[in-house]
Each structure stands twice: as C-alpha cells, then as structure tokens.
Image (spheres, grey):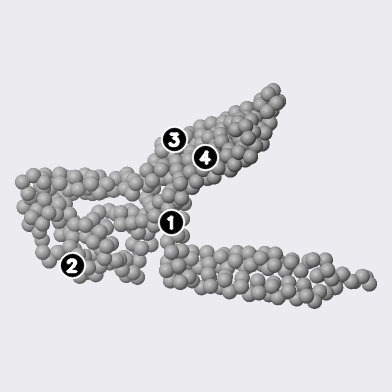
Amino acid sequence: MSFRDNLQYLRAQRNFTQERLAMLLGVSRQAISKWESGKAYPEMDKLLMICDLFGCTLDDLVLGDVRAPRSVPDATPGPSDGLGAAGLPEAERGICNGGLASDATSSNTAAKQSAAYGLSSNVSVGQQAVSVALPEDLTGYDAHMNSFAWKVAAGIAAIIAGVAVGVLFDSKGEVSGLLARSEFLTFVCTIIGVIIGLAFLIPAGMAHAEFVRRHPFIEDFYTDDDRSRRAKELAVGVVGGIGLILLGVAVTVYGEETLGIEEGWPVSVMLLCVAAGVFCFIYFGIRYGMMNIDAYNHEAESERKEREREAQGGDLYDKLTGLVCGIIMLIATIVGLWTLFTGGPIDGGGHERWLSGNGLFWLAWPIGGILCGVATCIIQIFRSFHDRDR
C-alpha cells in the first residue's frame, strides 16, 4: 500500500474526518486532502506525528501496509500499565493490525485510548465500535483567545487612561501649580500610557499570529449553550460600556455647569470612564466573535496562502499589481512635471488659464493614486476568483 492508502485506512479506522486530523497535526484540511490524493507529501515531523497518533511504525506507514505490519510488538501487557514490550498501547496495535479487540481487558484498554484521543467507544466482547465524541478544544483555542481579548482590551484602555491622567495637568496649572511643568507632565503621562498599551498589544498580536500559524484549522467545539452565554455577556458588556461613558459625560457636564470647571479632573474622569467602557466593548466583543470558528479558519487559510506566496517570491498577481501601479504613477509623474514646466490652456472663450499658473499640476498624483487603487481592486477580484477555483 502507498502512503496515501495507509493514511486513508488509519483515518477511517479512527473515524477521523479530514478536519479533525488536520487539527491534531496542526495543518490545514487542504493539506490532508492533498496527502490522500497523492498531490503532496508531508514533512518528516508530520510523518512522525502520524505514527505517534496512530501507533504504527514509520516503515509501515510510508513503505509497508499498516493492515499487516512487518513486525508486530509483543502483545503481552506489562504488569501494570497495559503496554507491550515495545511500549505501544494495545488499542494502537489493534488499529495498525486492522484487528479487533477480543476480550474485556483489551476492550477496556481501547476505551481508555479512545478517551485519550477525544473519542467515545461502545465496546462489547469480540467486537469494538469506535465513534467520534463531541468535539473538544484540543489546541487551547479558547484559552488563547480569552487571553488575546484581555490583552487587546487592556492595551487600548491603557492608552486612553494615559491621556486621562495627562489631562489632570490642565493649561491653568490647577494640579501641578506650574504651567510649563503641566504641559510636560501631560506629555509624559500620555507617552507612558502609549508604552503600557503597546506592551499589551504587541505581544498579544505576535502570540496570536504564531497561534494561527501553528493551528491553521480549528474544529468547532462550541455548543449552542456556549454561544447563548457569550451573547448574554456581550449584551451586558455593551450596556455596561455605554453606561460608563454616559457617567463620564455626566461628570463633565456637572463640572462645567455647576462647578465652572472646564478642564482638569472632570475631563480626566470622563476619559477614564471612556477607557473602561472601551475595555468592555473590546473584551466582550472579541470573546463573542471568537466563537465564529469558520471565520478563523478562513483567515488562517488566507494567511497560509499568503505565506506560501511570500516564500515563493510572490505570485503573478502581486507582480502584476506592482507593475500596473508603477506604470500609472510614472505616467502621472510625467504629466505632472510636463504641466508644471510647460502649462496649457484649460478653457476657451478667449480667456486662457494655465494649469501651472493655477497650481493645478499636483492633481496628476492624486488621480494616479486613485487609478492605482482601482487597478489593485480589479486585480484582487480576479485573484480571489483564481484562489476559489484552486
């Protein structure tokens, strides 16, 4: 049997879909499809992961027949762990051999192995039926996205809070007592807020990009109850955020209308309330949006294709876009310079006005930029159709 036949057989024995196997191996579903159709071949680390997942040897997987392996490990279990001399679980040897468990001991072991891989099994003497259980979060997607949501929300809120603290040092110097020092402290507080915000945002973005690279496909494991709960949390977060912002506005109005303070602490309190409200919007919004697994998979697949294009030095559409935009801007530059130095009439009626005299020569570059944008959009539309057909 060939590698693709062995892979199809092993996947069928475990009742794995291509999507589930892709998630376990950290590849896209399209990669599994290409392996099984013989259009592509996995790298060595993926081959070893497949051997470890299905409990077979590399020789049998690549060159042999997993239904009849060349060498079968000793089936005698150890004294306490249910493993043979080669350290392979009995359930794994049964799958590689294409055999079925025939006694209660091997059935119990198979059930444990199935549970370890997120499977549920209905086992009886002389017969084993393995079925896929409810999907599980095997990649840590939920924990990662919750951390990502918190860091992004905290980063944006920190930037706004830095501005809020800086506003305390108003132009009248009511807080610090010195006008020059007030302006300096306002600048310092704003910069500190930006630095703290970036300290949250940059690592969060890098970690998310790495997670998407390592897990290009996630099987949807959220239930209807999960989605209903997150929808309620989003509603509470939106209402709470709006309430905080309205509270800040009320404080500002009170300080201006009643206390006669137009700057200083009332504006600072308002901005702090805005920071808290924005935190609620972003945090609960990302937590709700993360349940759209289809959107994540689509984004991950798009990024994977983009990385492949970059690794290959770009594709035809990227080169075509650069060529077309370069030609357009070159023509725009020539027209603009020609108009600047030579000029020309733009209307009749006996009155001549010159483009250069009216300072309209610069219009060539904005028009060129607009044409570049239009050309790029058209090329990207053709590119999307091409990617869809692949």
How many neighbours does mark 2 have within 10 angstroms: few (below 14), some (14-19), or many (20 or more)?
A: few
Residue 11's tag is none
- Position of 350 with respect to 336 (left or right) is right
Residue under label 2: 59
Q: Earlier in the sequence, mark 3 or mark 4?
A: 4
For label 4, the crowd category at 10 Å Cα-Cα, with few meaning under 14, some 14 to 19 and many 20 or more, is: many
Kind of residue sitting beneath label 2: Asp
> What whole-number distance in Å separates the C-alpha atoms at marks 1 and 4?
27 Å
Q: Earlier in the sequence, mark 3 or mark 1?
A: 3
Q: Position of residue 209 (x, y in %)?
A: 42, 54
Helix, strand or loop at mark 2: helix
> Is the residue under label 2 in contact with that under label 4 (CB below 8 Å)?
no
Mark 4: secondary structure:
helix
Q: Residue at x 57, y 64 (%)?
A: 381
Q: Are marks 3 and 4 in contact (CB under 8 Å)?
A: no
Mark 4 highlights which residue? 157
- Left or right: 291, with 69 as reference point: right
Alpha carbon separation for disc pair 3 and 1: 26 Å
Q: Above or below — where is 318 with respect to 134?
A: below
Residue sitting nearer the eye, 337 or 237: 337
Amino acid type shown at disc 1: Ala
Residue 308 pos. (x, y %): 42, 66
Q: Which is more N-terminal, label 3 or label 2? A: 2
Q: Is residue 261 visible?
A: yes
The residue lying furthest to the right in this view is 350
Q: Secondary structure at mark 1?
A: helix
247 vs 271, nearest the viewer: 271
In space, the residues marked 4 and 2 are separated at their CA atoms by 55 Å
Q: Residue at x 50, y 46 (%)?
A: 195
How far apart are the two marked residues, 2 and 1, measured between alpha carbons?
A: 33 Å
Quickly name the residue at label 3: 229
Taking 20 as reference, is 69 above or below it? below
